[in-house]
Structures are given as structure tokens and as C-alpha cells.
Amino acid sequence: MSKRPLARLRFITLASILAIVTTAAPRAQAAHPFDASVSKTASASSTLDREVHADMDFLADDALDGRGSATRDEHIAALFAAAQFQSLGLEPGGDNGTFLQKTKLPDPLPERVQKYLSKYPDGPRTETWNAIGILRGTANLNEVILLTAHLDHLGIGPAVNGDDIYNGADDDASGTTAVLTLAHLLATGKRPKRTIIFALFGSEEIGGYGNRAFLEHPPVPLTSIVINLEFEMIGRPDPAVPEGTLWLTGYDRTDLGPTLAKHGASLINDPHPAQHFFRRSDNYALARKGIIAQTVSSFGLHKDYHQPSDDLSRIDFAHMDRAIQSMVAPIRWLANTGWKPQWYPGKQPAPGADLLPK
């Protein structure tokens, strides 16, 4: 609710990060319990469920004040992700040999963004943070699979029924958790042929500034990125599609979705074309660069979108566990094949095409 226990925030932040870092060695060296050979066992499912719960409990807790864009809380979320990437033995993809990429927000900012940042008691922030880890491929190929989500949400806002914390559990703690869990799954065991980059962007909600920083200072040449899969709002099922199904934005723009479906992904076309979701997430900025970049989601237009009620109590963890697990084998296939997706004729967005507001 509206109480924000700063001492508790510092405690859970330090405790969580230290717990991750201090367990780095056994986690990186042991056979991973989510390996494909045991992914259907009760033990593996239970372990995945615990991991998803732990990440969601941290990211969407009231103590993080809704991970407001370009705030201290977004920075803490980025540190949390960076610590996990480090514990897995990934290569750093951020600034100066770290897992964090920091960038200054433009000056002047749009008036609406200035107004948003001015509400924070410690003053308006001028920086945003990404967390980036790299799983280097074995085949020495100049080909990269990019898995992304956005760290931030709306932070503190107008109270609704006494609650002024916009936790963003579905939007997009769920996507961030998916990328972190996929990093754990893919970083353990046999290395893939293609390099996989895990990138979590800041300040998506106020204009995609973290994504812009990544594009301006990428850890690899943008021309080497074969595919970008963004994960956004997978914490609840969409009643518009069959049970256990996810949808992919831009499904009719490329052959990526149909090909992943042939390799086991429960992906179908976006059932909400009027919402233009392909143009409303971080993937679109990469697509304007010519990269095949699409978003995996199950957002069913629920009324908790951008409301304080988008909290942990509304998450369907069984659905979320299945959603993440369902993408493991298809992504492993992508990371080990030589196949490259293609735009359908006339479906690639123009370089100057505008991003639609969320």
C-alpha cells in the first residue's frame, strides 16, 4: 500500500543480491534441474516454480515502489538482474566490463516525462539503467539471439482504493522474470552454437530510453543480431486464445512465429490487432533497424493494466511457469540452428516509423 519501508527495502535488496552472488559457484557448475531431459518431472517443475516466485516476489514487492522509470528502484532492479547474470558466469555486456549499462536521459525531456520524474521525493533522476549478460556461443559465429524485457514500471502514482504503488507485476516483472529464468536454463549445460544476449531495459514506460541506449552502444554489432524476442506481460492467460497458448506480435510480418511453432512453441498470431502491440514495446526500435524483433505475450487486455492492482495477487503462476518452460526448447533450437528468419514482402517497418505510445 502507501507505506514504503526504506529499511526493509535495503534489507531485502542486499539479502537477495548477496544470496544470489554467494551461490554463484554451485549454480554455475551443477547440472541444472531444468535440463530438457528432466523438464517434465515434478522436481524440475517445482524448482522452476520456486525460481519464478522468488524473482516475481522481489521485483513486484511494494518495497520496490513500482520500479519507476529512471528511479533508484529501477536501478535496484537492474542490480538484482546483473547479480544473477554474474552468478551464472555470463560475460558482462554493460559499461566498463560490468553487467550494467547506464545512460543519461536527454535534456530537455518531454514535459510529460519531467512531470513524471518530479514526483519523486529524492528529486528527478537523469539516468536510466540496463542489465546485460552474454552467453557466448561455441561456433564462433557472428550471429546473436537477443532475449529482452523491460525492468521498469510506473512507480508511485495517484492512489486507487488507498494504493499508490503501481507494482507492474504483469507489466513487466513477468517478462523480466522470464528472461532471468531463461538465462538460468540456457547458461547451464552444453553451450549453444549461437551467442545469446539477455538484456533488460530501463525506462521503457517513459519513452524506451534504455532500449535507445542499447541501440546506440550495443555489446555486439547490430548486424549480428539474428532475432530479438521480447517478453512482455506473460503473467496471466489471455482468454482470447486457447489455454496454454502465447501469442507473438508481428506474427504475419515474418516467418519466425510459424517456424517456432513447428519446433514446439505454443505461439499463435496476436489476437488483438487493433491494439497495434507490435509497435508498443521495445522490440519495435530494433525492428526499425531491420532486425527480426517480436514480442511474446499473453496479455488479455485485463483492467489491471497500468493500475496499482497489477500486483502479485493477480499473477497466475501455473500459467507463467508453463509459458516460460514452453519457450525453452524452441529457443535452444534457435541457438543451435543455422536458420535465419525473414521479413515477408512489404512487412518490415520503415526506419523512421513511429513507436506508438503504450
Image: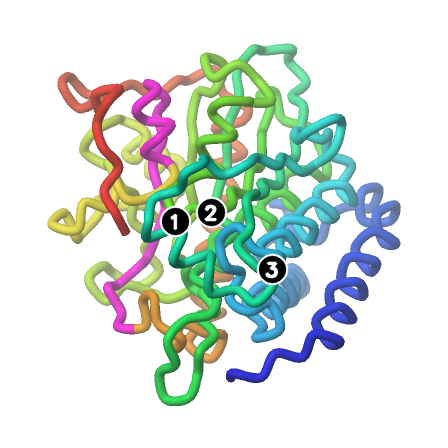
Q: Amino acid at mark 3?
A: Asp
Q: Amino acid at mark 1?
A: Ile
Find disc 2 in the rendering and name its residue.
203
Horizontal side of residue 325 vs 10, given as left or right: left
Find disc 1 in the rendering and name its residue.
206
Where is residue 259, by image quadrant? top left
Q: Quote the CA–CA distance across marks 1 and 2.
A: 6 Å
Query: Magenta part of the protein: which range?
Result: 283-303
Please tell me which residue lies in front, 336 or 26. Answer: 26
Q: What residue do we see at 82% from left, 60% from top?
A: 19
Please tell me which residue lies in front, 82 or 103. Answer: 103
Q: What is the x, y in percent for residue 332?
A: 54, 34
Please tell me which residue lies in front, 310 or 121. Answer: 121
Q: What residue do we see at 39% from left, 77% from top?
A: 309
Q: Secondary structure at mark 3?
A: helix
Find disc 3 in the rendering and name its residue.
73
Estimate how packed mark 2 is, as few (under 14), some (14 to 19) or many (20 or more) residues with alpha carbons within 10 Å.
many
Tell which circle, 3 or 2, labels the residue nearer the N-terminal end: 3
Q: Quote the CA–CA distance across marks 3 and 1.
A: 15 Å
Q: Quote the CA–CA distance across marks 3 and 2.
A: 11 Å
Is-magenta flag for residue 132? no
